[in-house]
Image (cartoon, rainbow, N blue to C red):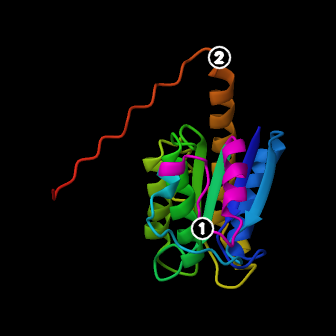
Amino acid sequence: MKVLAINGSPHAQGNTAYAIQLVLEELEKQAFETEIFTIGNHTIKGCTGCGMCFRNKDEKCIIKGDELNDWIQKMIQADGLIFASPVYYAAINGTMKAFMDRAFYVAGANKNLFRHKVGASIVAVRRSGGLPTFNQLNNYLNYSEMVIPTANYWNVIHGTVPGDAAQDAEGKQIMRTLGKNMAWVLKMINSTKDEIARPEAERKVMTNFIR
């Protein structure tokens, strides 16, 4: 089984990457294949709301000029996904937000491609704003019917400059715990996939408040 981690930070070796690595190390101890790709140092345009992914249903966004469609295919092939972001003004950074909007919109337009995948969110923060950013990331997972493993606290690690997070003993324990729990959930799902049928997906009901 494979777990793919998406690093939303522009720093491939920063505190966000460090937190990801702590989680992946626990998964690797249990023979999971892992991969990280850093999207925060790429230029990713935001979703334009054109709706073409719903019309085409080809698992692609029509916006050109970035690698989003390649990344979506890697996400589809993975058993587990980790989404990690630094905190910018108590929120997801802009590049990560653009990535999440487009990737999850495409997934939702194509029979909910991430449904029942195991997904976790990770946040690296200097001081405050970690929890609202964590909640923002989880909004995508919840909406997509993903299975979310937990840790023994919210998945937030603290640090300012690269290397600071190594001093956050509690943050490191959180990431290790998340990795262990994620491995357990993935194994549980894999071991029962032939015995317990997944619930059928219902067609999304949309209720608008203004008509």
Residue 156 visible in the displayed image: no
- Where residue 54 sits in the image (x, y, percent)? 48, 50
Residue at (47% x, 75% y) in the render? 91
- Where residue 45 sits in the image (x, y, percent)? 58, 75
* Above/below status of 96 relative to 28: below
Mark 2 touches mark 1? (CB < 8 Å): no
- Residue 36 lies in magenta, yes or no? no
Quadrant placement of the C terminus: bottom left
Residue at (44% x, 61% y) in the render? 135
Within 10 Å of the Cα at label 1, are there few (<14), some (14-19), or many (20+) other Cα atoms?
Answer: some
The kind of residue on which mark 2 rests is Asp
57 and 155: which is toward the camera: 57
Residue, disc 2:
194
Residue, disc 1:
63
Q: CA distance from mark 2 to mark 1?
A: 38 Å
Question: Which structural element holds mark 2?
Answer: loop
* Above/below status of 131 relative to 112: below
Q: Which residues are magenta?
A: 55-79
- Where residue 65 sits in the image (x, y, percent)? 68, 73
Question: Which structural element holds mark 1?
Answer: loop
